[in-house]
Amino acid sequence: MLDDEVLTIKEVAAHLKIGEKTTYSMAQAGELPGFKVRGQWRFQRSDLLKWIEDQKAAHGRNPQAEG
């Protein structure tokens, strides 16, 4: 399943359209749902998608109510 795909810092940064250093610091601070494999950050796509939805909800954005 595509949602089970594991992403790298570079892939997450590109997806979120933020810098790799920002992505790394957010992961280190526990602001992004990630895990380490031998010292390298990895992110499960389904966790990242849920995190994005949670961020939108926390900031009062409901895309279904728009348009």
Image (cartoon, grey):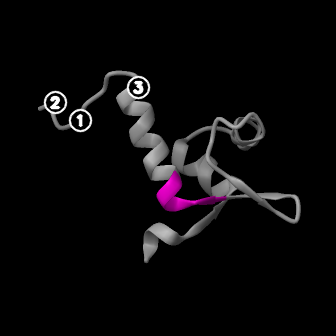
- Asked if the residue under mark 2 is in contact with the one under mark 3, i.e. CB atoms within 8 Å, the reply is no
The picture places residue 30, in percent across and down from the top left corner, at 70, 37
Give the CA separation, mark 2 to mark 1.
Answer: 5 Å
> First in sequence: mark 3 or mark 1?
3
Write the residue at 38% across / 32% down: 56
Q: Main secondary structure of the magenta part?
A: helix
Give the CA separation, mark 3 to mark 2.
Answer: 16 Å
> First in sequence: mark 3 or mark 2?
3
Say which mark, if any, is on residue 41: none
Q: Amino acid at mark 2?
A: Glu
Say which mark, if any, is on residue 58: 3
**Residue pointed to by mark 2:** 66
- As displayed, is residue 46 above or below residue 23? below
The picture places residue 39, in percent across and down from the top left corner, at 88, 58
Say which mark, if any, is on residue 63: 1
Quadrant location, the N terminus? bottom left
- Asked if the residue under mark 1 is in contact with the one under mark 2, i.e. CB atoms within 8 Å, the reply is yes
Residue segment shown in magenta = 43-47
The residue at the far bottom in this view is: 1
